[in-house]
Image: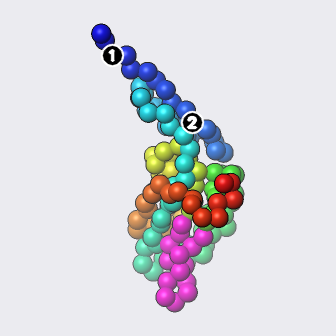
Amino acid sequence: MEAIALDVVHFSVKGDSTDARLALACGPTFIERFSMLYALMCTDKPNSLQIRLDTRPDHLVFLESLGDAVKFAGPFLGEDGKPCGSMVMVEADSKEATMAIAERDPYAKKGLFSAVEARPWAWAVKNPEA
């Protein structure tokens, strides 16, 4: 008996068609994909506070443009109380879709970050949607 590969891909579009394009590009898969939360953990380059301050208005407009895909966001603070990175909680269909969002962020386009990581996250306590 010959095995048959089924193309079973589920996706939702959160604000634009990035997730849909990525899902369609994956090709045949046996894994059903559903949206989940990803924490974008971004670390600023040293001595880059001015880039952050200058780019912040565009960054905030960008996050607002993502609509309900962004669950919450804010800066990490250094010992001096000044921003030194960002965390953005995003609902997306994959790590790749999450990283595509990160790459479009004005902060990233201006070269603010030394590192960006997307990690799957489960909202276990005080989840407003539970």
Label 2, residues with CA under 10 Å away: few <14, some 14-19, many ≥20: some
Q: Is residue 86 above or below residue 16?
A: below
| Residue denoted by label 2 | 11
Label 1, residues with CA under 10 Å away: few <14, some 14-19, many ≥20: few
Q: Tell me, yes or no, if residue 97 can be seen here.
A: yes
Q: Secondary structure at mark 1?
A: loop
Q: Mark 1: which amino acid?
A: Ala
Q: Which mark is residue 3?
A: 1
Q: Tell me, yes or no, if residue 105 can be seen here.
A: no
The residue segment tinted magenta is: 74-87
First along the sequence among labels 1 and 2: 1
For marks 1 and 2, give the CA distance: 25 Å
Q: Nearer the viewer, residue 1 or 105?
A: 1
Residue 35 lies in the magenta-colored region: no
Q: Mark 2: which amino acid?
A: Phe
Q: Secondary structure at mark 2?
A: loop
Q: Position of residue 69 (x, y in %)?
A: 63, 51
Q: Give the quadrant of the N terminus.
A: top left
Q: Is residue 83 above or below residue 36?
A: below
61 sits left or right of 25 in the view: right
**Main SS of residues in magenta:** strand
